[in-house]
Image (cartoon, rainbow, N blue to C red):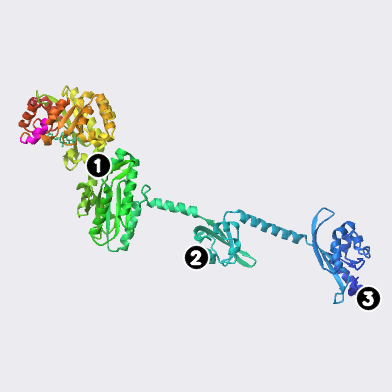
Amino acid sequence: MPETINAASTAEQGRSSDLLLRLIADSVPALMAYFDLPGLHCLFANQGYAAYNGHSTESILGLTVQQAIGDKAWQAIQPHVERSTRGEHVKYAREQTLPNGEVRMIEVNLIPHFEGAQKDRQLGSFVLITDITERWRAERSVRESEERMRKFTEATDEAIVFHRDGLISDGNEALYRLTGYALHEVVGLSIFNFISPEWRAVALDYTRSGREDPYEVTIRHKDGHAIPVEVVGKTMPFHHADYRIVVVRDITARKQAQEREAFNALHDSLTQLPNRRHLMDQLAKALARRQGQMAVLFVNLDHFKTVNDSLGHHAGDQLLREVADRLRHAVGEADVVARLGSDEFVLVLTSIHAPEDAARVADAVLQAMRTVFTVGHLPLTMSPSIGISLFPDDGATGDALLRCADAAMQQAKDSGRGNRQFYQPGMDLRAMEVLQQERLLREAIADSAFVLHYQPQICLKDGTLRGFEALVRWRHPVRGLVGPIDFIAFAESRGLITPIGRWVLHEACRQLKAWQDEGLALVPVAVNLSALEFRQRDVAGEIAAALTATGLAPQYLEIELTESVLMHQTGQVLGTLQALKDLGVGISIDDFGTGYSSLAYLKRYPIDKLKIDRSFVMDTPGSADDVAIVTAIVQMGRSLQLKTVAEGVETAEQMALLRSLGCDLIQGHLISVPLDAPAIRQWLLGQGAQTAA
Ligand code: C2E
Ligand code: MG
Ligand code: MG
């Protein structure tokens, strides 16, 4: 035992304090021993230490360390022991495998023992061995889990930042990738430094209140560009303080998609101009600001449909894009250019001083459109019709202003197109009428509320009946019978001509066949086809179908076409005409002399008849000019071997002149006005035919 422990004891006190020490030493959960110097003999060992090395507390006394622990263990610890004998407190931990195979971690303390306070002479060394397996395991698991955590946060693509009251204490690799800042550049700084100023209040609110739902802010990259991010923060107590763990997700792609979607919802995809919805919105905003006067210009392209029909939609699209560009250039920065659809555009001039300002812009638009467009490789001209409404004079709401501008545009169309009109009260009533008219016409088509009148054609040589022309009338619910002049062009403009034309064709064939079956009228019926119908419909196919359906022989049908049909698209027209010819159907040129005739086509196309327009006949024989024209047409017809028919013959003098010129047929009030089918039947049965003769 060291002298210090029992130095001052009497024998009795010594024994009892020895016993107490032994009791304590054997009770502590540690191995303890004392070895003297220089021999390193064991002077004391508690039970644990002695038993651990295979001794009793008595038998171990006096053994050297080497003897006490065995050669193998001695080899392992010898360097530590030697350091301890040189006065050093040596402390180390090592694994210890127990006889049962269990691995424990022990901590060994070799504590030098000196004589006196000066520590100039070392008397020996205490050995204190404690089992630290549990602590060691706990520490290891913490270390491993920290390591795992670190790997985990590095592996994720989501940036993660730890902060306390906004001061950054940690972050992962993805944070660097997102922001461009390395961790050491941001630790200790406030997270608010990295959030765009306008978003700081939001972030501060979330951080302060500890909210854990996601929110969006914009942060700044090190290079200065803005990054929209979604942020989710969670408050976590850590070392007696509240930390926020914040996951920062880059939502640039999502934002861009959202922006694109929002843009598409408000813009026309072809021209990228604002659409109707956006226009109405901007118009409402401009009106709310009410800075002086404003103007709305309704721009509609003239005959745009023709471009689409004849050159194709691709060309039409190209033209619309070019028009959009020119419109944008014609107005100021603060003004709005929108596309309502097809060939309809709207300009909003948000600040004008007088109506003349709007007129000037409209004139500039008219001027801008005058430059030839190049679509594909074709030069094209295009004029717009423009209607103008003014705020506050014409209306106080976007709807009202647009309606007035639209009505004024209709007026511009009616006044010959390619011009501008200011809205005048009453114009919109006309627009209403147009809508009403269209509705009625649609109903008429659904109900087949039409009737055909027939006008006889008579041979000038012998006065015999040679045919009828079928002329359509609309049974209007209010106006009674309405003539074709009043609704055919309208039907064409509203895209309603096709069903009407089909009905006429079918009805004419049906009626003629019925008369034939009755033994009447072995003459052809002529049906008028407008140029638009001729272009849009599969004319030959439909005619063949109508003939089959009604059982009428093809030589009893004639088609009347105007000159304008022949002037376009030579190849296609020729094909269709040839198909009709092949069917056995007759072809007449109606209103001849009023179009821009090229005599060349008369030779090229398989035509049977020329119908001399009423305007040339009506002033004969008084007008020498008209007599000359009619004479020329008749002679030309004869030399081209075409039959000539004079329209609108009202007097006996006209008939006599035409007969002397050698015209083949006449049609007009002199013979008969157009009559409905029952009247024609009477005419055929009775004296009508004789009158003609
Ligand atoms: P159009 O083919 O030249 O028909 C002749 C027009 O002159 C008819 O007018 C007829 O009533 C009128 N008329 C005939 N004889 C005389 C006369 O002696 N004096 C006067 N003043 N007029 C006479 P309507 O029926 O009003 O037809 C006008 C035009 O409408 C027709 O001119 C034709 O181009 C067109 N049309 C008629 N029916 C149809 C149809 O079913 N389809 C198409 N696309 N157009 C049609
Ligand atoms: Mg006709
Ligand atoms: Mg005619």
| Magenta region | 622-631
Dot 2 amino acid type: Arg
Assess whether residue 630 is covered by the magenta stretch: yes
- Contact, CB < 8 Å: mark 1 with mark 2? no
How much space separates mark 1 and mark 2, taking CA atoms?
Answer: 59 Å
Nearest to N terminus: mark 3 or mark 1: 3
Q: Is residue 319 left or right of residue 200?
A: left
How much space separates mark 3 and mark 2, taking CA atoms?
Answer: 81 Å
Disc 3: which residue? 12
Q: Nearer the viewer, residue 363 or 78?
A: 363
Disc 1: which residue? 493
Q: In this orientation, does residue 400 appear?
A: no
Is the CB atom of the residue marked by disc 1 within 8 angstroms of ligand 1's nearest atom?
no
| Number of the front mark, 3 or 2 | 2
Q: Whole-percent x and y of residue 225? A: 49, 59
User: In this figure, what is the number of numbered marks?
Assistant: 3
Q: Residues within 10 Å of mark 1 (few under 14, many from 20)?
A: few
Q: Is residue 11 left or right of residue 507?
A: right
Disc 2: which residue? 200
Residue 619 occupies quadrant: top left
Q: Residues within 10 Å of mark 2 (few under 14, many from 20)?
A: some
The kind of secondary structure element at disc 2 is helix
